[in-house]
Image (cartoon, rainbow, N blue to C red):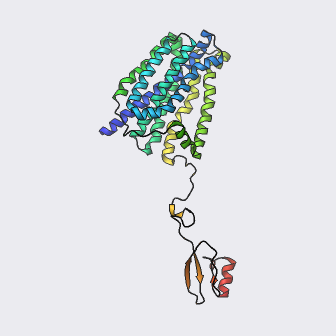
Amino acid sequence: MTASDRRRTFVFLVATGLIAVETMLFTMVVPALPVFAERHGLSDPEAVLIFAAFPVAQLAASVGAAGLVERLGRRPAMAGGAAVLLLATLAFAAAGDPASLVLARAVQGVAAGIAWTAGIAAISDVYPADQLGFRIGLAGTAGGGFGLVGPVVGGALIEAVGIGRTFALAAILPALLVVPALAVPETRRAPRPVPRLLVGFRQVLSRPGARAGAAGLGTAAAVLALLEPLLPLELDARLGLTPSGVGLVFAAGLLANFAASPIAGRWSDRRGRRRAHDRRPAAAGRRPAGRGGAGVRPRRRRLRDDGGAQRAAPHTGGRRRRPRGHVRVQRGAADHGLLGRLHRRAE
């Protein structure tokens, strides 16, 4: 393995580790939701808010994280995200009221959004385009694997040592990634201008393919967002499941979702991403660019004079007056169909 391969592998492992840890911390809270609801007398919407604060904050942070990652670089963003994730997890473990729980979860989401964006950017920097689908899918699968483990481990630990100690132990995971993130080589080649937020949205949504992809992802995310926080509360209320049982059911639902990520990535590498809307001819010269425009071959009409010799005349765009005694023959008309037979018989 060359030095370049080792560097690429190290970047991939650290970035994947960040994605895996933040996904685990995201799902680890699921078995605790019924406990929080019972302990603090929360209604379902209030308990859901504890869960939803993480992804909402992550989404909001991800929108602005691209510019931050371009300005600061991948390494500082990954290391900073891991450090803030560590502090926020400790704050969540020590929180004693619903407002503190929501705030700590929101800070976790912000840190996860920055670390996720920086990790994906670093992977995109070091791998060629024909491997990106597989690599990003593999990173998503690793994150999904830890996401599956999160509810199971979280439920078992909550029953064994309680919620506070469970999340204090969970803070060890981001702590283990701070130093490797600081050791990651900077992969940003040169600072690139990042368009303003609204300008970037307009550029993306101006393409039909991008609009269709955003609509599909948004719909799927909305359905999952409705199911994920309500499922543990429903399992506790209807079936009386323990935190461990809630974690197992939730993990089973995530298994198929995350297992498909590398398969989809490899498929896109081999078959190509879905072409947006451009079905024009590949050759630019075959595309009309207006009358007399660039890349347009002028049409020519075949004229036959009295002596039988053929000559070509360029199409001028207007109605050409045929000289007396000349018979115009469309290209190919003398070879096909009834008109062709009549023409040959006349000759």
Q: Residue 206: which quarter of the image? A: top right
Write the residue at 67% across / 82% down.
Answer: 341
Query: In this rendering, is residue 334 above or below 306?
Result: above
Q: Which of the 4 image quadrants contains residue 99? A: top right
Quick check: 205 above or below 310? Answer: above
Depicted 300 relative to depicted 177: above or below: below
**Rendered residue at 55%/39% (across/down):** 201
Relative to residue 7, is residue 22 drawn left or right?
Answer: right
**Is residue 170 among the parts visible in the rendering?**
no
Residue 166 is situated, as x and y percent measured from the top left of the image, at 49, 14
- Quarter the N terminus occupies: top left
Q: Position of residue 8 (x, y in %)?
A: 36, 37
Work out whether residue 163 can be spotted. yes
State whether residue 327 is above or below residue 287.
below
Viewer-proximal residue among 189 and 19: 189
Is 246 displayed left or right of 70 in the figure? Answer: right
Total numbered circles = 0
The quarter of the displayed image where residue 306 is located:
bottom right
> Where residue 252 sits: x, y (%)?
57, 26
Side of 244 relative to 126 (left or right): right
Residue situated furthest bottom in the rendering: 307
Question: Which residue lies most toward the left here?
Answer: 3
Residue 92, horizontal then vertical, whole percent? 50, 15
The C terminus - image quarter: bottom right
